Amino acid sequence: MDAQVIVVGAGAAGLFAAIHAGRAGARVIALDGAKTIGAKILVAGGGRCNVTHHSVDEKAYAGSSPNAIKNVLRRYGVAETVKFFEAYGVELKREDTGKLFPTTDDAHTILNALLRAANDAGVVIHHPRRVTAITRDADGCFTINGDSGALRAPRLILCTGGKALPKSGSDGLGYEFARALGHSITNDVFPALVPLILPGTHVLRALSGLTLDTTLTLKSSTGKVLKEFTNSLLCTHFGLSGPCALDMSRYWRAALIEDAGAGLFANFIAGEREDTLDAKILASRAANPLGFLREHVPERLARTLCEVAAVDPAAILRQLTREQRKALARAACALPLHVEGDRGFTYAEVTMGGVPLAEVKLDTMESRVCPGLHLAGEILDVDGRIGGFNFQWAWASGFVAGGAAAAG
């Protein structure tokens, strides 16, 4: 055997799995095909690396069942993550959003800590070393074939990620490895935490650069509210970005798969609904619609909402008809977005879909269909909201998989 444990994919989950397998006494080799090790770590959080969130639970995730996700997350929590990085001199700070970043505001701080921990644990990292095929021998050992020949080990941990940000090395090949070893992949594999594209004529595209707190509401074709997020929304030349749009993207996609008539709506005035805003228009002392809306939103958006409602921004506010008031309230509190797509895996932060957690033993992350194989990170059907949740999934699942693989 070349090693006791081989880890394929040395991103966040892979490095963590390798570290904890090495700490448990195993001889570990980690392989990664990317030219730059930890490429996704380095670009995360705008290059600052949002390591985790101060409060993490299963409600922040989608994909596999909440109970299954909870069972893994509780094995390695936020406090353990903070202690791990503190041991390598990395101090984390909590921002108002609850996100935890290194005080250096530099993702290299996180990657360097992981690489030092891997070195201390005796992990041998080979990169760029692209894996092209994996087989399991009759004796239960794995042969990992790649650009530089073959390696063998009795235990294998797949941490290849999904398909998001393919230039970092996550090109979906890991799914083929998982299939070859007996696993299934969910039918729907799509970008998640990805910007949304609006039709070319949509009024918000002309507001590129505008950012404000917004509530996005996803409704079924029958009007049932399916999901709602309130957070910062960024209007762009192609459509929508920012935390609110990114969080909603996977739910929009999932809803569309089941219901072609599902739609997304924007409310730009926090705490208001169409009826309550209509009442405020009636009671307002503002001179005109533009003046009223400017009390709540930036002027550029106020003018656009008047345009959508077909209301003269300079009209006398108290002389608006009932229909005009309602049109204005509808534009401000329930603007149809008519999303026509997303920007794809190239711009996505994570992947929706993957290997179902039902095919994995949650206490070890070992495959139920291929003994000796463990899985961790984004290759699994688990994706979290923006804010450090996907990193915490990587740390937790990597910790469990690494320790169990070494013990096996």
Image: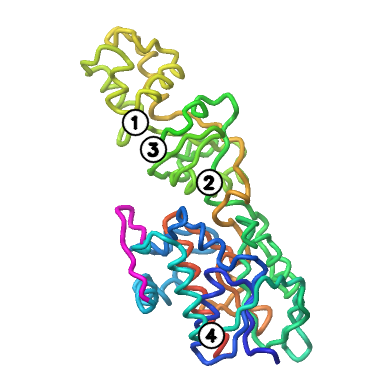
> What residue is shown with label 2?
249
Mark closer to the observer (4, 2): 4
Q: Earlier in the sequence, mark 4 or mark 1?
A: 4
Answer whether labels 2 and 3 touch (C-beta < 8 Å): no
Q: What residue is shown at x 46% (from left), y 19% (from top)?
A: 308
Q: CA distance from mark 3 to mark 1?
A: 13 Å
Q: Earlier in the sequence, mark 2 or mark 3?
A: 3
Where residue 149 appears, x then y in whole percent? 78, 80
Residue 359, relative to residue 26: is it above or below? above
> What residue is shown with label 4?
21
Where residue 323 appears, x then y in whole percent? 39, 13
Q: Earlier in the sequence, mark 4 or mark 2?
A: 4
| Mark identifier at residue 214 | 3
Q: Is residue 30 left or right of residue 136?
A: left
Where residue 30 appears, x then y in whole percent? 62, 78
Q: Is residue 126 left or right of residue 362?
A: right
Name the quadrant of the N terminus: bottom right
Mark closer to the observer (4, 1): 4
Label 3 crowd bin: few (<14), some (14–19), many (20+), radius 10 Å: many
Q: CA distance from mark 2 to mark 1?
A: 23 Å
Give the colour scheme of this rendering: rainbow
Residue 88, relative to residue 304: is it above or below? below
Q: Is residue 377 magenta?
A: no
Name the quadrant of the C terminus: bottom right
Instruction: Identify residue type, mark 3.
Output: Thr
Q: Is residue 92 magenta?
A: yes
Mark closer to the observer (3, 1): 3
Q: What residue is shown at x 65% (from left), y 57% (from top)?
A: 166
From which residue to which does the magenta span run? 89-100
